[in-house]
Image (spheres, rainbow, N blue to C red):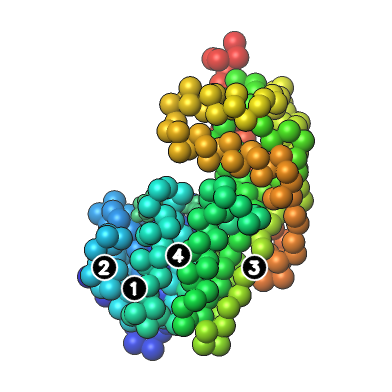
Amino acid sequence: MPDTTYSTPGRPRIAVAGATGRVGSILTSLLASDPVDVIALTREPEQAKAPEGVAVAGIDFEKANTLDDALRGVDSLFVAHGTSPGQVANEIALIDRAVAAGVRHIVKLSAMGPATRLIPCAWHMEIEAHLARQPVASTVLRPSTFAQLLALYAGAITAGFWTGAAGHGRVNFIDTSDVAKVARIVLLDVVAPESQRAYHLTGPRAWTMPQVAEELSRLTAQAVVYKHCSPEEQRATLLSFGVSPFVADLGVGLDQMFRDSVLGETTLTVEELTGEAPRDLSDWIAENVELFRQSEAASA
Ligand SMILES: NC(=O)c1ccc[n+]([C@@H]2O[C@H](COP(=O)([O-])OP(=O)(O)OC[C@H]3O[C@@H](n4cnc5c(N)ncnc54)[C@H](OP(=O)(O)O)[C@@H]3O)[C@@H](O)[C@H]2O)c1
């Protein structure tokens, strides 16, 4: 059962799935200052650190009653889910229970990208298509690549290089805080019943990976190089880091999209919706520069 301590009659009630994740955690913190009741949905309620004033509900995607309990009385639902094999089934289960519970507006975190068989875009297409058929207002957020993706390569970058099969393709990076700001705005919107919207969210410009390497070199004051390799070589490298075949395929699929510049589009949507220009990749790197810097001991 959701903790109803923070339930206020007459205030809109917003549930956030994926509240412990990169976008959801920022969104939940932002909403905590708004005149709404916020409920964070998580599989691990004991470990969740919700902001002051935010209620927490434990959910198990395979137990419909846990979803029904968490969604009772909810007006708007944000759906984010980590990229893992259960994603399509879990998001669809959540959407179905939300519709059954009378949720009026579902905001789904999707991804920018072409019609493709590549994950995660293929999965998002499937979930979006399901959502589109439901008798509920919906807003789909399709961000470009998260700046935070670079953190996955930080270990390699501190050693002076990382590898990839993205070639000289152009990629637009968006900061997850900008995605969360847009999500807040659309969740607070009063939408017409069964209205359907989709927004393409990007940072201010696109980069090639060699340009990202140059920027990392400038900001860390250390030489950083992007080493080009084939998709097969990149898959083998990722597997050698100990990731699963699923994650290795995901990384190689993303590189294919990067190489083809299909995530290179730049839109004005973040600024139009939030009133603030989106953060540049440089801002994010500068803020997190220590992640990418060689330690004094390692460089000595
Ligand atoms: N990375 C990118 O560059 C990028 C770009 C565009 C779009 N996206 C999309 O953004 C979404 C991810 O958003 P995010 O980065 O904010 O999420 P995230 O940090 O990866 O994870 C969000 C939350 O999903 C919940 N979750 C529930 N079931 C899960 C499961 N079986 N496996 C993993 N997590 C599960 C987890 O919460 P609990 O553990 O608390 O239950 C987790 O904290 C994906 O759909 C992805 O396709 C990503």
Residue 283 percent coordinates (x, y)? 68, 46
The tag on residue 64 is: 2
Amino acid on which the number 4 mark rests in the picture: Val
Nearest to N terminus: mark 3 or mark 1: 1
- Pointer 2 residue Cβ closer than 8 Å to ligand 1: no
Judge the density around disc 2: few (<14), some (14-19), many (≥20) Cα neighbours within 10 Å. Answer: some
Residue at image position (54%, 15%) is: 297
Nearest to N terminus: mark 1 or mark 2: 2
Pointer 1 with pointer 2, Cβ within 8 A:
yes
Q: CA distance from mark 2 to mark 4?
A: 16 Å
Label 4 sits on residue:
79
Residue at image position (56%, 37%) is: 251
Of 242 and 153, nearer the camera is 242
The tag on residue 199 is: 3
Asked if residue 192 is positioned above or below residue 266 in the image, the reply reads below
Pointer 3 with pointer 1, Cβ within 8 A:
no
**Residue, far front:** 117
Nearest to N terminus: mark 4 or mark 1: 4
- Pointer 3 residue Cβ closer than 8 Å to ligand 1: no
Of 144 and 249, nearer the camera is 249
